[in-house]
Every structure is written in structure tokens, then in C-alpha cells.
């Protein structure tokens, strides 16, 4: 089994989103894309995470993110959905100190507040072309 190139994945994603306006899970998206990545005897592989990041960064789909609460002590440096940098939304306390109240990803729309949000399910919505 070979790892699919970025171009192969993008072509397969475009075909999937032409046929399916909504894909209900990351696992289902990988199954659909994998069916396009088979060429005769050759079978190409792509991981779910890589597929999600390519779909977001290439603006082929928007992602609806379902999540659960996580450890509030954990510091977020990168977006857990797409790997982009997170913007910190800060506020001033009554004592004049700056505190981070929220983390926001400008690329995919992920956000997290005081209680860290851990993504558990993704629903992909194809963007109109």
C-alpha cells in the first residue's frame, strides 16, 4: 500500500464533494476518498487527519465540529482540527492583568474557551464550486 500524494487526495476529495454535499463523519470521508484512490492493483492510503486538514486548507469543505470538554490546564498552541495557529482573545481583569478568555482558529472556525474543547466528530459540508 502506497501513501497518496497531495494531488491525488485533492482530486479524490473534489470527486467526493461533487457527489456528496454533506459527509457525516471523518471515517466516512476516508472511506469515500479511498474508493477513488484505488487504481487497478495499486491501493493508496491516506489518514483521516491528513484528509481533514487537506479538505480544510484547500477550501473544499467547511467542517462542523462536535466536541467534549477537556483538561482546562492544557495549553493550546496549534489548532487540534487543522494545525493552524490559534488566535488568543484576551481581556483585562479588574486588577489590570491580561487573561486569555478564548482561543480561535481563523482557518477552520475551531474555538475553545476556559474549558478546552476536544474535537470528537466532524461533519463536512462541501463548498459550492
Image (tube, rainbow, N blue to C red):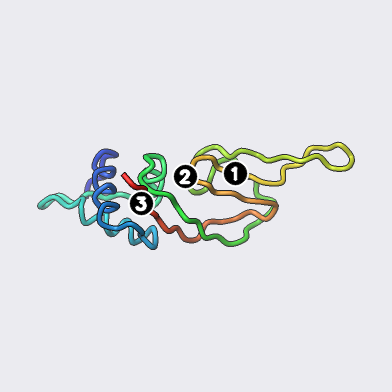
Labels in figure, total: 3
Quick one: label 2, few (<14), some, or many (20+) residues within 10 Å? Answer: many
Between 23 and 73, the residue placed more toward the observer is 23
- The Cα atoms of the two marked residues, 1 and 3, are separated by 22 Å
Instruction: Kindly identify which numbered label has been placed on residue 127.
Output: none
Tell me the SS state at disc 2.
Answer: loop
Between 56 and 72, the residue placed more toward the observer is 56
Vertical comparison of 128 with 97: above or below = below
> Mark 2 or mark 1, which is nearer the start of the sequence?
2
> Mark 3 or mark 2, which is nearer the start of the sequence?
2
- The Cα atoms of the two marked residues, 2 and 3, are separated by 16 Å
Q: Nearer the viewer, mark 1 or mark 3?
A: 3
Find residue 14 and report its horizontal and vertical position in percent: 27, 47
Tell me the SS state at disc 1.
Answer: strand
Residue at label 1? 104
Find residue 124 and report its horizontal and vertical position in percent: 40, 55
Tell me the SS state at disc 3.
Answer: strand
Quick one: label 3, few (<14), some, or many (20+) residues within 10 Å? Answer: many
Find residue 83 and report its horizontal and vertical position in percent: 49, 42
Vertical comparison of 62 with 77: above or below = below
* Whether label 1 touches label 3, CB < 8 Å: no
Residue at left offset 35%, top offset 45%: 60
Q: Nearer the viewer, mark 2 or mark 3?
A: 3
Say whether residue 120 is left or right of residue 20: right
> Mark 3 or mark 1, which is nearer the start of the sequence?
1
Residue at label 2? 82
Quick one: label 1, few (<14), some, or many (20+) residues within 10 Å? Answer: some
Residue at left offset 24%, top offset 50%: 15
Residue at label 3? 126
What is the quadrant of residue 92 in the picture?
A: top right
Amino acid at each position: 500500500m502506497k501513501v497518496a500524494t497531495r494531488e491525488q487526495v485533492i482530486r479524490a476529495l473534489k470527486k467526493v464533494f461533487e457527489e456528496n454535499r454533506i459527509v457525516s463523519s471523518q471515517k466516512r470521508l476516508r472511506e469515500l476518498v479511498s474508493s477513488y484512490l484505488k487504481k487497478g492493483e495499486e491501493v493508496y492510503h491516506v489518514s483521516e487527519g491528513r484528509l481533514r486538514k487537506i479538505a480544510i486548507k484547500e477550501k473544499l469543505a467547511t467542517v462542523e465540529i462536535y466536541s467534549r470538554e477537556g483538561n482546562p490546564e492544557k495549553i493550546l498552541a496549534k489548532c487540534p482540527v487543522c494545525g493552524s495557529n490559534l488566535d488568543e482573545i484576551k481581556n483585562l481583569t479588574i486588577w489590570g492583568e491580561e487573561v486569555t478568555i478564548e482561543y480561535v482558529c481563523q482557518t477552520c472556525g475551531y474555538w475553545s474557551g476556559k474549558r478546552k474543547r476536544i474535537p470528537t466528530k466532524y461533519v463536512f459540508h462541501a463548498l459550492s464550486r
